[in-house]
Image: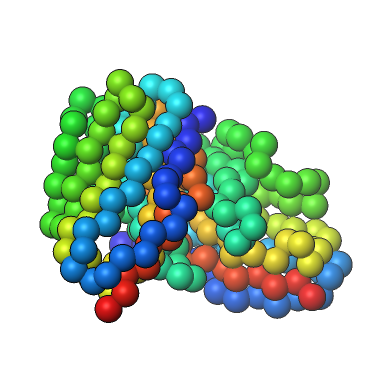
Amino acid sequence: DAGVIQSPRHEVTEMGQEVTLRCKPISGHDYLFWYRQTMMRGLELLIYFNNNVPIDDSGMPEDRFSAKMPNASFSTLKIQPSEPRDSAVYFCASQTGLGEQYFGPGTRLTVT
Amino acid sequence: SQQGEEDPQALSIQEGENATMNCSYKTSINNLQWYRQNSGRGLVHLILIRSNEREKHSGRLRVTLDTSKKSSSLLITASRAADTASYFCAASGNTPLVFGKGTRLSVIA
C-alpha cells in the first residue's frame, strides 16, 4: 500500500478563497482523522470518521470548515472562506481499530 | 478522549547519550503509543505498549508503562544526530488517540 495520500502538498491562496484538501486513507482502515498543526497550538484534532461517518467534529474551529467522507477511500476538508489564521499544516491519518495511526505527508496551507 | 502529555517540552543532548522522555495520561487505557515527527513531516508510529505490559523494547527504544501512576517513559539509547525530532505519546482507550504537544529532542553531534 502507498500509505495515506494527501493532495495538494502545498497550497497558497488569498484570503476569502475556498480551499479543498484531499485525503486517501490506507485501504481497509476504518478510521480517518483530520489534524491541523501550528507552532502556537501544536497538533489539533479537527474531526474524525468511523466507517465514513463523522463521529466527532468538536475540533472544527468554526463553520468555515467542513469535512466529508463520501466513501471509504476518499475524504475532503474544505475551508470557505479561508483566512490568514488558517495557515497551518493539515494532516490526514487513518487507523484500524485501536491500533496505530498512519499519517499522510501533510498539506502546507498558506493564506495571504 | 485520552490525551498524552509529554515532559520535558524540549531536550538537548550530545550524540551517544541516552534520552528519556515522559508521558502522563488521565484515564484508563488499552494501550499507549509513541510517535516521532521529523520537521515538516507527518507523525510516524514508533512503538505500542499494551496496558498489561510493563516494558517493551524495539531496537534502541525502550518504553515503560506504569498504569498505577498513569505514566510512560520512552528511552532512546546511544542517541544519534538523526534522532533529532519531536516525540509524541498518545493514550488509547475506547476513543481515538489525542496527541500532546510533544518533546522536541535535539541531538548534537
Quarter occupied by residue B54: top left
Q: Residue at x 84, y 70 (%)?
A: A15
Q: Is residue B107 above or below residue B30?
A: below
The image's colouring method is rainbow
Q: Is residue B33 left or right of residue A87?
A: left
Q: Residue at x 79, y 75 (%)?
A: A112
* Foreground of the two, B97 or B24: B24
Q: Residue at x 64, y 57 (%)?
A: A40
Q: How many marks can you see?
A: 0
* Foreground of the two, A74 or A81: A81
Q: Is residue B69 left or right of residue A35?
A: left
Quarter occupied by residue B90: top left
Q: Is residue B60 above or below residue A11?
A: above
Residue B25: percent from left, percent from top? 42, 32
* Foreground of the two, B89 or A28: B89
Residue B103: percent from left, percent from top? 42, 54
Q: Residue at x 45, y 26 (%)?
A: B26
Q: Is residue A95 above or below residue B84?
A: above
Visible residue check, residue A31:
no
Quarter occupied by residue B18: bottom left
Q: Is residue A67 left or right of residue B8?
A: right
Q: Is residue A91 above or below residue A66?
A: below
Residue B40: percent from left, percent from top? 49, 71
Visible residue check, residue A66:
yes
Residue B72: percent from left, percent from top? 31, 37
Which quarter of the rendered picture does the C terminus of chain B lie within? bottom left
